[in-house]
Image (spheres, coloured by chain):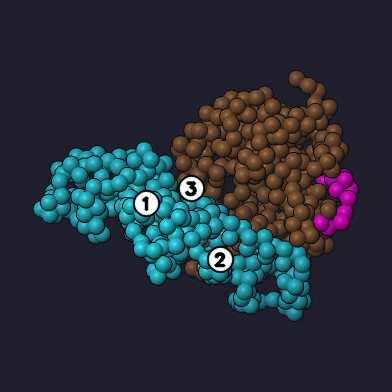
Chain colours: A cyan, B brown
Amino acid sequence: MALIDYQTVLGRMLREQRSDDHLRDVTLDERESRYIENVRDSAEFRFYASVQRSWCITRATKAAHLTLSLLPQEERQRLLDEWIDSGAGAQSFFFVEADLFLDFLGKRLSDRPRELTMCQFERATLRAGDGVSYFVAPDPASLQNPDCFLRRGSYAGLVRFEKGSNDVHEQGPLADLFHAGMIVMFSPGLPQLWHEPSAEEVDLWEVLDQPASVRTLLSHGHSSETLETLLSQGAIEYEYEK
Amino acid sequence: MSPQDNPQFPPNGKLIQPLGIGFPYFAELPADLYRSGLVAFVEITPETLCRQRATATTPQIEIVPNRLATAQETCAGLPLVIHGVELSIGSAHGLNNAYLKMLDSFQKEWPFVWHSEHLGFQTIAGDNNSTLEIGVPLPMPATVEAVELVAARSAMIQQRYRVPFLLENPAHYFSALPADVEIGDEYRFLNAFTEKSGCYLLLDLHNLYCNAVNHHFEAREVIDTLPLDRVIEIHVAGGSWRDGFWMDAHDGRVPEPVWELLEYVLPLAPNVGGVVFELLEDYAVRLGTSAIEDELRRAWQIWNARHGAN
């Protein structure tokens, strides 16, 4: 059997454990096909499959520990299964894996506001923490140019902890933040990565849902001091960066 | 400069300066461990000091400057060896060039005495020239094609970094791997590899022990068939049972039979530069420095019996 066929089929069988399509685009003779089927039926392969799946689950669980802890066991398992059955979960670099999983999770929690907030919190923490290694406060001089465009920072985030009523998670993780209805801004240039933003900072963040020029922002009443402060923290950045 | 001009490079497989006992670098462990005198050299998996960044074309692996600086400060003065995990040297669709580009930069920042990787593959080709990670490392078949692929790539890597390049014998759970009669089996693969590539071996005794336990053979009999003059580094590690298999989990102390294998092999392997007690970082923190130091002292006892105490 050609090496690439052997590896492709074995790799697919592990990545796509609930699929029978691992022989697509691969030409094997009868003896080779029988070998592959024997491998797939073996206790040794089942062990590999079990280890692979458990490692994928471990990585995902580490990425979204708080969010998953809020979900009922069945729902948690259903989401993890969906994630891993899609072929995901095998990235070796934690940030890449965690960011992808939190993105996946966030898209499936629209009817669970508390869990969605927790997911946004974990993703904002992850990204701001990752950004610490790269963030260098930019020169504020460009803010003097009214045609300079600004956008939300690549490593920044804003999370709204909505106060719920009669919520079963009132005693859960970060319950104080939910109870206070707190808004938290994450920025890689802040010593603790987060702060409670002012109303003007929140407004600016919302406006920068789309990039905007300094001229536009100032004309809408945002102060140059706020622009400079958030720029220095990495909450916003010049559009030409990255 | 040719490899032979490099004083750290063993000409024709002859001696490399023996270092002693090494230990992996873990940011989570106290720096004092690396300054205790029990660690003669440090083994770094450079990817742990890196992040992956997706670009418009291909992923890149970038060194994170503050992680590198912390590691250099912690390990100041200790010789460095590299033990990579991301190369996937046996992947038929291609090895991880992003890893090699990262290692180019790494070597400029922090030169290393030798460089090792795992013999196996962990990626396959996806659609549109993408690379898919499998999620677990898998063993190579003992075929002519596989030997030639890995040997050519290894020779290229050894030339690129001008230090010895070692491949580690893997632990795996398949009782029989595909094999060509010209190669024989996975251990004769190692002989063929060193002959064809001019490269070296990292003999992982715990991996060998795992395979011996799971596939029912005598580890010493296999050791006797290996090209022991090509062994530059030895690993010892711990494992645990899972679902009826002894697993190469790197999760604790070294089992007694693995220590016995070290005692057996050291006098037979004339060019060993160092022995590393391997652990995963999470388990290193759980095991604690006191237990780690116990294992390092045990390794030193065996090393000194062969090389004499300094």
Rendered location of residue A191, percent (x, y): 36, 38
Callout 1: helix, strand or loop?
helix
Crowdedness near tag 3: few (<14), some (14–19) or many (≥20) residues, C-alpha within 10 Å: some
Q: Quadrant of the N terminus of chain A?
A: bottom right
Side of A42 relative to A58 (left or right): right
Q: Secondary structure at mark 3?
A: strand
Disc marking residue A177 = 1
Q: CA distance from mark 3 to mark 1?
A: 31 Å
Query: Residue type at mark 2?
Result: Gln
Q: Chain of mark 3?
A: B
Q: Tags 3 and 1 in contact by the CB under 8 Å rule?
A: no
Task: Let me know if residue B191 appears in the view.
Answer: no
Q: Which residue is mark 3?
A: B51
How far apart marks 3 and 2 lie (CA) works out to: 32 Å
**Residue at 19% across, 39% down:** A141
Q: Position of residue A40 (x, y in %)?
A: 72, 71
Question: Is residue B46 found left or right of B175 in the rendered image?
Answer: left
Q: Amino acid at mark 3?
A: Arg
Q: Which residues are magenta?
A: B214-226
Q: Residues within 10 Å of mark 2 (few under 14, many from 20)?
A: few
Foreground: A54 or A238? A54
- At a point 72% along the width and 66% down the height, the residue shown is A45
Is residue A212 at all visible to an observer of this figure? Answer: yes
In percent of width and height, residue B291 lies at 71, 34
Front residue of A187 and B92: A187
Q: Output the chain of dot 1.
A: A
SS for dot 2: helix
Same chain for mark 3 and mark 2? The answer is no
Residue A73 is labelled as 2
